[in-house]
Image (spheres, rainbow, N blue to C red):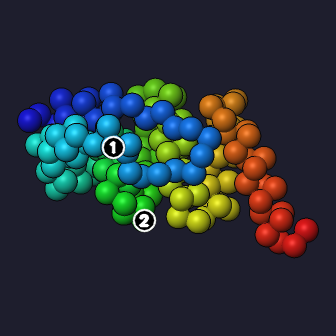
């Protein structure tokens, strides 16, 4: 399998999320092993890690790795890869925004609401209103104010 073809396949996978905490486990009807596993798609994680070191493929490879590890339930490793992707140049603003949104989901799922809030604020400033980012910012700010005893 060619890296570019595999990245295209992964990139075309649906990334819609809802206004609920991130759940790294896809619904049962979406858990076809060949469709949701990088290994099942014939990709080797080492190859993606190598591609993530190259400027031209860094964003796509790091995003694919982040999504893979999050789906596997390894949020910390997934977050590290999504952070690397966020530092790289995306092909489109939509791709960059989607990656930041997923990063915020992962932070929130890990219980790091303040880090999720920072990512969402950056996303909102960059995009001018991506998905439900503003509503999530409000919700997280209210939750943090409540946890501070305010």
The residue lying toward the viewer, choosing from 64 and 14, is 14
Looking at the picture, how far across and down is residue 116, in whole percent?
Answer: 62, 55
In three-dimensional space, the C-alpha distance between marks 2 and 1, rounded to whole angstroms, equals 23 Å
Say few, some or many: other residues with alpha carbon within 10 Å of mark 1 (under 14 / 14 to 19 / 20 or more): few
Q: Is residue 57 visible?
A: no
Residue 28's disc is: 1
**Residue at x-position 28% and y-position 43%:** 31
**Residue at x-position 46% and y-position 26%:** 92
The N terminus sits in image quarter: top left
Instruction: Give the residue furthest to the front.
Output: 28
Q: Is residue 26 visible?
A: yes
Residue 92's disc is: none
Q: Identify the element where label 2 is drawn.
A: helix
| Earlier residue among tags 2 and 1 | 1
**Residue at x-position 87% and y-position 73%:** 149
Looking at the picture, how far across and down is residue 47, in whole percent?
Answer: 16, 50
Residue 76's disc is: 2
Looking at the picture, how far across and down is residue 36, in whole percent?
Answer: 26, 42
Instruction: Give the residue furthest to the bottom.
Output: 149
**Residue at x-position 60% and y-position 65%:** 112
Q: Quadrant of residue 78?
A: bottom left
């Amino acid at each position: 399998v060619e890296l570019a073809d595999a990245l295209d396949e992964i990139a075309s996978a649906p990334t819609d999320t809802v206004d609920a905490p991130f759940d790294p486990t896809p619904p049962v009807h979406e858990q076809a092993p060949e469709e949701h596993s990088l290994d099942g798609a014939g990709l080797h994680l080492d190859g993606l890690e190598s591609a993530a070191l190259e400027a031209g493929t860094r964003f796509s490879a790091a995003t694919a790795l982040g999504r893979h590890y999050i789906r596997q339930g390894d949020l910390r490793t997934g977050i590290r890869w999504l952070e690397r992707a966020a530092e790289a140049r995306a092909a489109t603003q939509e791709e960059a925004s989607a990656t930041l949104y997923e990063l915020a989901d992962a932070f929130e799922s890990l219980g790091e609401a303040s880090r999720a809030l920072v990512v969402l604020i950056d996303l909102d400033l960059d995009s001018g209103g991506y998905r439900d980012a503003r509503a999530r910012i409000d919700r997280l700010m209210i939750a943090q104010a409540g946890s501070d005893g305010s």
